[in-house]
Image (cartoon, helix red, strand yellow):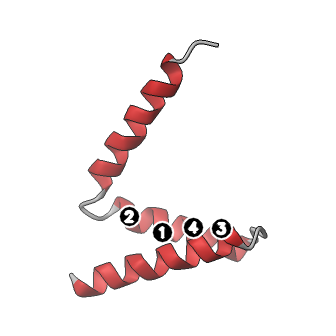
């Protein structure tokens, strides 16, 4: 478990740093994709999915 948390934290920090620089290159996109695939395989995935679904429902319910 400690290795999984460390790997997830490392990928999250790398993605945040790469996005803050404002230059998204192929390597940066690869790090972000790896983070996404890593999170999809963890126990946090259902929580993230529920949060995104709830956000999409709220946004789709807004009428201009």
| Residue that carries the numbered disc 1 in the rendered image | 35
Residue at the spot of label 2: 39
- The residue beneath circle 4 is 32
- Pointer 4 with pointer 3, Cβ within 8 A: yes
Instruction: Give the Cα distance between marks 4 and 3.
Output: 5 Å
Q: Residues within 10 Å of mark 4 (few under 14, many from 20)?
A: many
Q: Secondary structure at mark 2?
A: helix
Q: Residue at x 48, y 69 (%)?
A: 35
Where is residue 16? Give x, y as percent. Answer: 58, 71
Q: CA distance from mark 4 to mark 1?
A: 5 Å
Quadrant (top left, top right, bottom left, bottom right) of the C terminus: top right
Farthest-out residue, top? 63
Q: Which residue is mark 3?
A: 29
Q: CA distance from mark 2 to mark 4?
A: 11 Å
Q: Residue at x 68, y 70 (%)?
A: 20
Q: Going 54% across and 18% down the picture, which residue do you hit?
A: 62
Q: Are marks 2 and 1 in contact (CB under 8 Å)?
A: yes
Q: Nearer the viewer, residue 41 or 22?
A: 22
Q: Quadrant of residue 7?
A: bottom left
Q: Residues within 10 Å of mark 2 (few under 14, many from 20)?
A: some
Alpha carbon distance from label 3 to label 1 = 10 Å
| 50 sits to left or right of 19 | left
């Amino acid at each position: 478990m400690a290795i999984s948390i460390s790997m997830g934290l490392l990928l999250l920090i790398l993605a945040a740093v790469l996005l803050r620089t404002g230059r998204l290159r192929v390597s940066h996109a690869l790090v972000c994709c790896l983070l996404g695939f890593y999170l999809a395989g963890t126990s946090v995935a259902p929580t993230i999915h529920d949060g995104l679904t709830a956000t999409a429902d709220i946004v789709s319910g807004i009428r201009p």
